[in-house]
């Protein structure tokens, strides 16, 4: 089981057990997976910037943000929307497709109830570790 499957199933499980349409969890799963991937990418980029600032890829990315003459907040929002659209779109077409989403849900629904609940906790842990790592990189690096 990879972490993306765990995230998708957690969204399916939560909606199904609250009496709502579990197919709407596909959108939630796509967005949550995209956010987790972005948090990890930014954390990795910050770590690379800290420990290898002369890397050509890091210099190019840094140049993107320093070469912009205008409101940095607006540029950050634009780049953030672009990245989430690209990653979310890729997820929507691949593992987050309706067919794949239902296949993931069916596979996890065959597990015993205690393993399903354990999977839900794993999804929360995945998000919290990604978010804590992001905060660590932002504030302590």
Image (cartoon, rainbow, N blue to C red):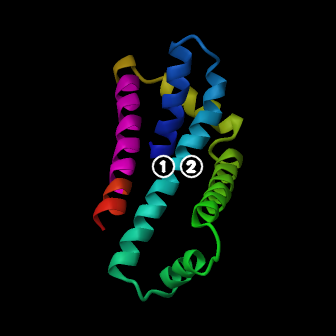
Furthest residue toward front: 70
Q: Position of residue 127 (x, y in %)?
A: 41, 43
Residue depicted at x 35% and y 31%:
121
Can residue 9 be seen here? The reply is yes
Q: Categorize mark 2 by other alpha carbons within 10 Å: few (<14), some (14-19), many (20+).
A: many
Residue depicted at x 66% and y 25%:
23
Residue depicted at x 49% and y 37%:
7
Image side of residue 87 versus residue 55, left or right: right
Residue 35 position (above or below residue 40): above
Q: Quadrant of residue 105?
A: top right
Q: Categorize mark 1 by other alpha carbons within 10 Å: few (<14), some (14-19), many (20+).
A: many
Q: Which residue is mark 1?
A: 36
Q: Nearer the viewer, residue 54 or 15?
A: 54
The image quadrant where one finds the C terminus is bottom left
Residue depicted at x 65% and y 35%:
27
**Disc number for residue 34:** 2
| Residues shaded magenta | 115-133
Q: Nearer the viewer, residue 55 or 92?
A: 55
Provide the major secondary structure of the magenta segment. Answer: helix
Q: Disc 1 vs disc 2: Cβ atoms closer than 8 Å?
A: yes
The image quadrant where one finds the N terminus is top left
Q: Position of residue 90 (x, y in %)?
A: 67, 53
Residue 9 position (above or below residue 61): above
Structural distance between the alpha carbons of marks 1 and 2:
5 Å
Image side of residue 90 versus residue 116, left or right: right
Q: Secondary structure at mark 2?
A: helix
Q: Position of residue 19 (x, y in %)?
A: 57, 10
**Disc number for residue 5:** none
């Amino acid at each position: 089981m990879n972490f993306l499957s765990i995230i998708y199933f957690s969204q399916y499980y939560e909606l199904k057990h609250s009496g709502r349409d579990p197919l709407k969890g596909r959108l939630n799963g796509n967005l949550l997976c995209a956010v987790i991937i972005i948090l990890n990418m930014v954390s990795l980029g910050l770590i690379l910037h800290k420990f290898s600032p002369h890397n050509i890829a890091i210099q190019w990315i840094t140049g993107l943000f320093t070469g912009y003459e205008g409101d940095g907040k607006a540029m950050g929002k634009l780049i953030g929307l672009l990245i989430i659209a690209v990653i979310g779109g890729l997820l929507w077409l691949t593992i987050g497709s309706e067919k794949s989403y239902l296949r993931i849900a069916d596979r996890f629904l065959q597990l015993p109830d205690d393993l399903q609940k354990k999977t839900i906790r794993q999804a929360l842990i995945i998000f919290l570790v990604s978010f804590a790592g992001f905060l660590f990189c932002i504030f302590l690096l």
